[in-house]
């Protein structure tokens, strides 16, 4: 497992994009439709909080977690999401969701919590 990025879940994507890109001068790319930006040089991504939590909790829609306003997600790239899922399940990790393809992200992902309820994502880019 290799560290990839910290994803900041932001309430106002455009305002945050302007702040990090134009004021702080971070360089990267962004997608307004997905409300996602990635600043490769510093491994920080911005993602609309609402879109991120809706994507993670698509099956469950836990409003109590959305109300807690998750502020970030730690993202790790792995060679095989399903393999890491099984490995971590066998170590007692309870996952938020099972490995699944997010075609709109171009990735296979799964999410779980650390002991302080921070969200961790394991992912692998889908090569098409």
Image: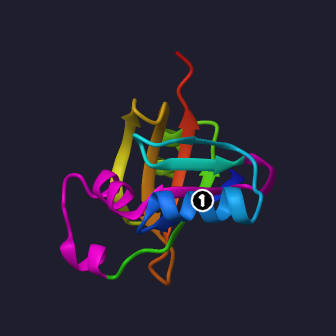
Q: Residue at x 75, y 56 (%)?
A: 26
* Location of residue 16 with respect to 115 vertically, above or below: above
Residue extending farthest to the top is: 128
Q: How is the image coloured?
A: rainbow
* The one of 57 and 86 positioned closer to us in this rendering: 57
Residue at image x 54%, y 51%?
122
Q: Is residue 50 left or right of residue 37?
A: left
Image quadrant assignment for residue 22? bottom right
Residue 40 coordinates in the image, percent (x, y): 74, 47
Q: Nearer the viewer, residue 16 or 116?
A: 16
Position in image of residue 58 (x %, y %):
23, 52
Residue at (51, 74) in percent of width and height: 114
What residue span does the magenta drawing correspond to?
Answer: 40-67
For mark 1, what is the residue? 18
Q: Is residue 91 visible?
A: no
Q: Is residue 48 left or right of residue 40?
A: left
Residue positioned most to the right: 41
* 57 is higher (above) or lower (below) than 128: below
- Which image quadrant for residue 113? bottom left
Q: Position of residue 13 (x, y in %)?
A: 46, 59
Element assignment for label 1: helix
For residue 102: magenta? no
Image side of residue 116 versus residue 24, left or right: left
């Amino acid at each position: 497992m290799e560290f990839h990025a910290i994803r900041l879940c932001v309430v106002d994507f455009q305002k945050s994009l302007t702040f990090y890109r134009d004021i702080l001068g971070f360089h990267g790319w962004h997608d307004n439709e997905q409300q996602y930006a990635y600043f490769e040089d510093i491994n920080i991504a911005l993602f609309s909080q609402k879109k991120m939590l809706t994507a993670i909790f698509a099956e469950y829609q836990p409003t109590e977690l959305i109300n807690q306003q998750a502020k970030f997600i730690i993202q790790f790239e792995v060679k095989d999401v399903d393999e890491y899922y099984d490995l971590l399940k066998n170590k007692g990790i309870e996952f938020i969701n099972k490995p699944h393809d997010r075609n709109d992200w171009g990735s296979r992902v799964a999410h779980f919590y650390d002991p302080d309820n921070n969200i961790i994502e394991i992912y692998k880019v889908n090569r098409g």
